[in-house]
Image (cartoon, rainbow, N blue to C red):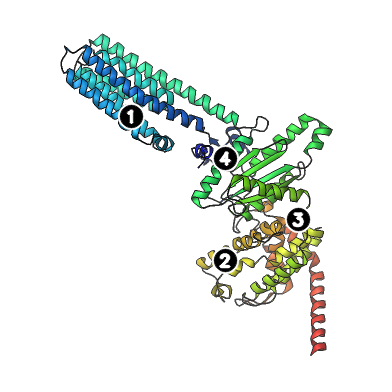
Amino acid sequence: MSDRARAYLCVSSRIWTEGREKCGVSEGLLKGPTGSADRRIVRRDLGFQIIDFSEVKFRLRIAGARIWLTYLLSLVFGCYAVGTWEGTERLALVALAGGYLAWGMLVRLLPLDKIVHSRSRDLFFLAWSVAEVGVIAGAMSIDGGSDSPLAALLFIPLVVVALTYPPMLVLAVGTLELLAYLMIAVNVGGRDDLSLSLFAVSLGITALVCAWQTRIRDAQRDELNRISRADPLTGCLNRRGFLERLDAEVDEAARGGRSFGLVALDLDRFKSVNDSEGHAAGDELLRWTVDQLNENLRPMDSVGRLGGDEFALLIPGASRPEALTLVERINGVLKDRAPCSLGVACFPADGSDPEELQRHADDELYAAKEGSRITTAPSRRELSWATALAQAVDARIAVPDEHSTAVARYAATIAEEMGWNGSDLALLRMAAMLHDVGKVGIPDSILRKGGPLTEEEFDQMRLAPVTGAELVGRVEGLGAIVPWIYHAHEHIDGSGYPEGLRGDAIPLASRIIAVADAFDAMTTNRPYRAAMSREDAMLELHRCTDSQFDGECVAALERSIDIIEGELAAEALESNALEERWG
């Protein structure tokens, strides 16, 4: 693991629990905007506490210095014993000095680099300080108690721990020293009450001052680390901070075997805004863009400004369908004021290191800028493949009635009624054709069951859109329709699956497919019920409007239903004529 990544793995993500549920790996990833107040806090504080690797290296240097300090204290004990040889128990003092010297040599043999990088480093250094205080207290007891000149050495551990310890540990060491000194005074004797009190107060004040100074030092260091990784204009991560965060996420995802998404974002008209309205307007547009991004991301996600109008998003735990859904939502949020081009890369499918992931995301971004194939109508080969796959799925459903083809027809007609055309309409038709492709992973016993599903069986059905989106996402050129398939079973009131999105947070294409799918399902025979009439099916759609279905989509279907029925009747007549002709 790189030093930079290791440092960032010391990052402790800020826990956000006020007014929201805890997020899982993907839970809440694609839900609607979160509270803007919370996101402003995340933007200001960057969402995590940074522990720079330079601080870790500093602790390692301090550990080496403490070993030499151990040798020095052992020498002080030895010299003091020789200089006061006429006193009592000088050999015990020399033996204590020798034992402390051996302790220093033993510590030198330990893997200090690993200890400093471990989570138990504070516990280790605290134990080291306890040992120092114990040695000094033992030497004082041997030398006559609290009036021993060796008592002055108690200030040395306080000064050392104030260099690297957090404030609470500094206070803990200071309290330990004060208790040790008072216990020696009570049990061994020594100074008079006035001298004892003055020394104890001096020791306590020193501990408080050291802790106070440590707190100021930590605050200054954290602020410097934050500033060095924050973009001063927008408050999000700058290039350095984002790349460090990306390095750490790659290492963490590789160890944990999970995915994450990297989104590259470039504002398309930023230069024209700067040229026509001035740099102040351009700066305001950048700040607004970051605010909108923050409001549509989770607290655990990261936003970075890599250049003038170049941004990047890091989405821990996101699969490609989830990342593409996020891209679509961001496009919808920014398109009126700050239209942008976006590219997506997912670990590990699109790369196993930061450079490869960035290159893939940039390639998709530039392809989107140039009107790449991902935003164009499906080719004839793709349509043939989609039709064949949809027919294979239909064949496994209880009544193989070309359900997918019918849903595609209904969806396209609804979309045309709502003003869709061109490549968007073609992509919608394909998405509707493939909306049930995830059912390839559902057992026949569930697909063909004549009665209602059990809760366990319905749980398996809920996985179908996830599986379908994953399958389609692996086909080059179909990335645009992945979120439409993924959210085709969401409900307007948030009771659907897989993400429980509500209202406009559900892609419009998914809302159209949901209405088309329900209408065809109700008007065809199923093992558990007979087909409804067209009128009854429309009444049911209206009944579930604004709870399950989008009212505009239902109205569009109702306005165009006669056209659809006419086309179906014409096709049936043509089919019958062909059958009669060819016998």
Looking at the rendered image, the disc whose residue lies closer to the viewer, 3 or 2, is 3
N-term-proximal mark, 3 vs 2: 3
Residue at disc 3, secondary structure: helix
Q: Amino acid at mark 2?
A: Met
Please give the residue where the numbered disc 2 appears in the rendered image: 461
Verify CB contact (< 8 Å) between mark 2 and mark 1.
Answer: no
Q: Residue at x 28, y 12 (%)?
A: 197
N-term-proximal mark, 4 vs 3: 4
469 or 457: which is nearer to us?
Answer: 469
Figure disc tally: 4
| Within-10-Å neighbours for mark 2: few <14, some 14–19, many 20+ | many
Q: Is residue 546 visible?
A: no
Q: CA distance from mark 4 to mark 3?
A: 30 Å
Please give the residue where the numbered disc 4 appears in the rendered image: 245
| Quarter of the rendering containing residue 163 | top left
Residue at disc 4, secondary structure: helix
308 or 529: which is nearer to us?
Answer: 308
Residue at disc 2, secondary structure: helix
Q: Amino acid at mark 1?
A: Trp
N-term-proximal mark, 3 vs 1: 1
88 or 278: which is nearer to us?
Answer: 88
Q: Amino acid at mark 4?
A: Arg
Q: CA distance from mark 3 to mark 2?
A: 30 Å
Side (left or right) of 371 relative to 184: right
Please give the residue where the numbered disc 3 appears in the rendered image: 375
Q: CA distance from mark 3 to mark 1?
A: 63 Å
Please give the residue where the numbered disc 1 appears in the rendered image: 128
Q: Is residue 480 visible?
A: yes
